[in-house]
């Protein structure tokens, strides 16, 4: 056994673990688990299921990763959990595998910051560079885009989609899709504008941000139906070609929404 694996850890014979992975006292690693180079597993963690973990992740004490989905339809199918590189997963986080009723895989991308007591349910698809604060609860089948930030104690209904670069205040209740770039909070969620500060930090130009503020006004201030707002956004793309791609992200998100968007 590697000197980086504590003698009290229990490692199943079939587990595939890179040579420099550190595993703390009393942790348990299942037979279908793969853990990439440089990853740290703290004490008292359980990682099981058909779970693949990339490089340079850090799981703090008492995490439960790769557990079976909390879905009464689940009958023991070999569904999966895939975790990318460079994620920080704090104490008591639970992340479950997928179900055969969806794509069968729960995914967490790269460079995400998952704080204590977060639950990520079956079939969630989490992008890259997100911040999911303490005790956020994600039901099944939720999609979260890159750079999204969810404040502590927020609860998200199953099948909801949260767009890229959103910032959601703590203790919010999310029942419908949240379009990209927005900032807001509440129960129910109430959008208040565009996440200008976050977009600026990520390299969006002042012209891009100004164009996205126009999309916000079309969606929330002009009393338009979503389809009508999308048509006006396409006109805006012609008027502001430099912001075409940023606006297209919004149009694509709105066009794909099946739950409807939060408009309180």
Image (cartoon, grey):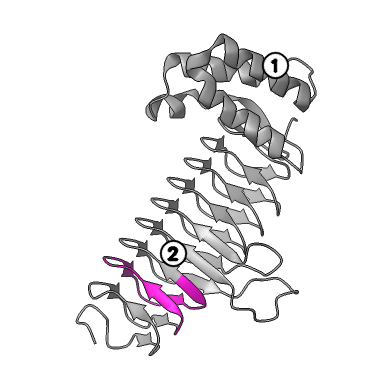
Rendered image: mark on residue 91: 2
Camera-nearest residue between 97 and 192: 97
Whether residue 217 is visible, yes or no, is no
Dot 2 or dot 1: first in sequence order is 2
Left/right of residue 234 with respect to residue 45 in the rendered view: right
Answer few, some or many: residues within 10 Å of disc 2's Cα (few below 14, many 20 plus, some between 14 and 19): some
Which residue is under mark 1? 232
Residue found at the very far left of the displayed protein: 3
Q: Residue at x 28, y 67 (%)?
A: 37
Q: Nearer the viewer, mark 2 or mark 1?
A: 1
Direction from residue 247 to residue 7 in the image, left or right: left
Residue at 65% across, 19% down: 234
User: In the structure shown, which secondary structural element does the residue marked by tag 1 occupy?
Assistant: helix
Q: Is residue 109 above or below residue 231?
A: below
**Residue lying at 56% horizontally and 20% vertically, measured from the top left:** 212
| Residue at image point 71% right, 66% down | 101
Q: Which residues are magenta?
A: 31-51
Splitting the image into 4 quarters, where does residue 168 fall?
top right
On whether residue 37 falls in the magenta region, the answer is yes
Quarter of the C terminus within the rendering = top right
Residue 8 image offset from top left, x and y in percent: 32, 88
Are the residues flagged by discs 2 and 1 in contact, CB closer than 8 Å?
no
Within 10 Å of disc 1 (Cα), the crowding (few <14, some 14-19, many 20+) is: some
Residue 221: where, in percent of width, then height? 72, 16
What's the distance in space between the residues labelled 2 and 1, CA to CA? 46 Å
Judge by depth and name the residue closer to the eye, 144 or 42: 144
The answer to which of 118 and 163 lies nearer the viewer is 163
Q: Is residue 67 above or below residue 165?
A: below
Q: Quadrant of the N terminus?
A: bottom left
């Amino acid at each position: 056994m590697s000197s980086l694996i504590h003698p009290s850890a229990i490692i199943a014979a079939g587990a595939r673990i890179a040579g420099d992975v550190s595993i703390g006292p009393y942790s348990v690693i299942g037979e279908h688990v793969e853990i990439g180079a440089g990853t740290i597993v703290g004490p008292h963690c359980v990682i099981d299921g058909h779970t693949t973990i990339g490089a340079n992740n850090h799981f703090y004490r008492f995490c439960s990763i790769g557990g079976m989905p909390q879905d009464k339809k689940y009958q023991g199918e070999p569904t999966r959990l895939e975790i990318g590189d460079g994620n920080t997963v704090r104490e008591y986080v639970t992340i479950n595998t997928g179900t055969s009723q969806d794509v069968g895989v729960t995914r967490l991308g790269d460079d995400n910051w998952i704080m204590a007591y977060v639950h990520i349910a079956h079939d969630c698809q989490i992008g890259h560079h997100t911040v999911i604060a303490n005790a956020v609860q994600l039901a099944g089948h939720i999609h979260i885009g890159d750079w999204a930030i969810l404040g502590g104690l927020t609860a998200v209904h199953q099948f909801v989609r949260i767009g890229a670069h959103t910032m959601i205040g703590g203790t919010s209740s999310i029942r419908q899709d949240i379009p990209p770039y927005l900032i807001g909070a509440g129960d129910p969620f109430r959008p208040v504008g565009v996440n200008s500060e976050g977009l600026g930090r990520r390299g969006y130009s002042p012209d891009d941000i100004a164009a996205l503020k126009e999309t916000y006004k079309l969606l929330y201030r002009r009393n338009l139906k979503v389809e009508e707002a999308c048509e006006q956004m396409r006109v805006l793309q012609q008027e502001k070609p430099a912001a075409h791609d940023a606006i297209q992200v919004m149009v694509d998100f709105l066009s794909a929404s099946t739950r409807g968007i939060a408009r309180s």
